[in-house]
Image (cartoon, rainbow, N blue to C red):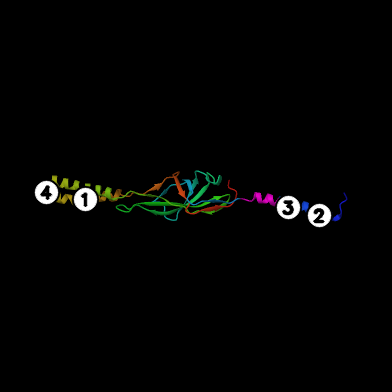
Amino acid sequence: MHLTKRSYLLVGAAVLLAVAMGYGATVYAARPVSITIPERTPIHVALDQTLASNKNKAGDHFQATVTEPVVVDGQTAIAKGTHIEGLVVDARKSGRLKGKADLRLALRDVQVNGQTYHLRTTSVARVGAGHKKRNFLWIGGGAGGGALIGALAAGGEGALIGGPVGAGAGTAVAFLTGKKDVKYPAETHLTFRLAEPVTLNGNNG
């Protein structure tokens, strides 16, 4: 069959179109797929450093490592071993006679495939024990001991004098030993949950 010049041009155009369509399909197929991690998804981490209520302050950053992969619909969004940055949300030292220690943490950023994503998560907290019962035992015990010593030394009048002196001693012991700060040692395992969804661009699986 004899092809005219016009036929050659049409065949050439068709070949070029097919090649272009195939290339476009390849590019589309290779295009990275976004993954959205839903709200409430847990993120399990281990701390890379020690944090303490008497050493850290609100606004301090800390580093942690993801201990379990975050998987969405069968795809790994955040791989195990990924480094993640957190924030000290609140840090309050323990008082000596009153005021509980408080250390509250949240996750802030994660880097996946060279891109940093901001996270909003729930916080985890450790709160120190209260002072009241312990201080009462120290102060009350001191008062009782002072009264007993006073009574042995000088009878009833001595008991009246010894009581306040013993209470003062007990208060001093409570003051010197009363701090109850809290800390998270390095490698402590913690679980945070996303407070809102986050979308990661790129093929992370």
* Apparent side of residue 174 relative to residue 66 in the rendered image (left or right): left
Is 55 or 133 nearer to us in this picture?
133
* Residue at image coords 12%, 50%: 157
> Mark 4 or mark 1: which comes first in sequence?
4
In space, the residues marked 1 and 2 are separated at their CA atoms by 106 Å
Q: Given the image, on which type of amino acid does mark 2 rest? A: Leu
The residue at which mark 3 appears reads as: 20
Q: Looking at the rendering, in which quadrant would you find the C terminus?
A: top right
- What type of secondary structure mainly makes up the magenta span? helix
* Residue at image coords 79%, 54%: 13
The mark lying in front, picked from 3 and 2, is 2
In space, the residues marked 4 and 2 are separated at their CA atoms by 123 Å
Q: Given the image, on which type of amino acid does mark 4 rest? A: Gly
> Mark 1 or mark 2: which comes first in sequence?
2
> Mark 4 or mark 2: which comes first in sequence?
2
The residue at which mark 1 appears reads as: 167
Residue at disc 1, secondary structure: helix
The residue at which mark 4 appears reads as: 156
The residue at which mark 2 appears reads as: 10
> Mark 3 or mark 2: which comes first in sequence?
2
The mark lying in front, picked from 1 and 2, is 2
* Apparent side of residue 146 relative to residue 30 in the rendered image (left or right): left
Is 45 or 19 nearer to us in this picture?
19
* Residue at image coords 15%, 51%: 161
Q: Given the image, on which type of amino acid does mark 1 rest? A: Ala
Q: Is residue 138 magenta?
A: no
The boundaries of the magenta stretch are 23-32
* Residue at image coords 18%, 50%: 163
Callout 4 environment at 10 Å: few (<14), some (14 to 19), or many (20+)? some
